[in-house]
Image (cartoon, grey):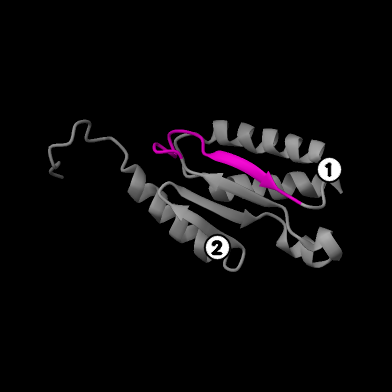
Amino acid sequence: PGGEGREGEARMDYAQEQADEIEALQSIYTGYFDVLSESPWKFLVAVDPEAAQERSGDSAEPVRLEITFTEKYPEEVPEVEIKYSHILSRHATALKRHVMEQAEELLGNVMVFSLVSAAKEWLGQQN
């Protein structure tokens, strides 16, 4: 494989990695995935849409992760915010801590699917 003269041939193509992951996520989370911006990638993904459908009123809103990729994601952890209407703020804080711990463990790998799964599992344990 011939390099284009870029230093560090083993260097990851972050933009391509990110675009590929976004494409995969859009197909996995069809209907529950909203891209907010592309440069940097920033998006919302619903964590518990099935559970949300069983609730009513404000609590029918799913918990969402708002994720922003850093320039060097996945070799840097993404920025994560918890968007919620029906869980306690202390639970949202604990959930964010849990998700960020997972992100640290997954550093260097595409991780959004794993982070959403971890968040879903965590929420399931709170009920």
Residue 107 at x, y percent in the picture: 49, 34
Tell me the crowding category of disc 2: few under 14, some 14 to 19, or many 20 or more residues within 10 angstroms, Cα based.
few
SS class, disc 1: loop
> Which quarter shows the N terminus?
top left
Query: For the residue labelled by badge 2, is the local secondary structure a helix, a strand or a loop?
Result: helix
Q: Main secondary structure of the magenta part?
A: loop
| Amino acid type, callout 1 | Leu
Q: Residue shown at 78%/67% (left/top)? A: 53
Tell me the kind of residue under disc 2.
Ile
Question: Residue at 61% across / 55% down in the picture?
Answer: 45
Q: Mark 1, residues whose alpha carbon is within 10 Å: few (<14), some, or many (≥20)?
A: few
Residue 6's spot in the image, x, y percent?
17, 36
Instruction: Tell me, yes or no, whether the highlighted magenta stretch contains residue 61.
Output: no
Q: How many numbered badges does the structure rendering display?
A: 2
Query: In the rendered view, would you say 91 is above or below 64?
Result: above
The CA span between labels 2 and 1 is: 28 Å
* Percent position of residue 58, x then y: 82, 60
Segment colored magenta: 70-84
The answer to whether residue 52 of the structure is visible from this angle is yes
Residue assigned mark 1: 88
Q: Is residue 66 left or right of residue 76?
A: right
Q: Is residue 98 left or right of residue 74?
A: right
Quadrant in which residue 70 is drawn? top left
Q: Are marks 2 and 1 in contact (CB under 8 Å)?
A: no
* Residue 12 in the figure: left or right of residue 46: left
Q: Residue at x 28, y 35 (%)?
A: 11
In the rendering, which numbered label is found on residue 28?
Answer: 2
Question: Could you say which is closer to the camera, residue 81 or residue 47?
Answer: 81
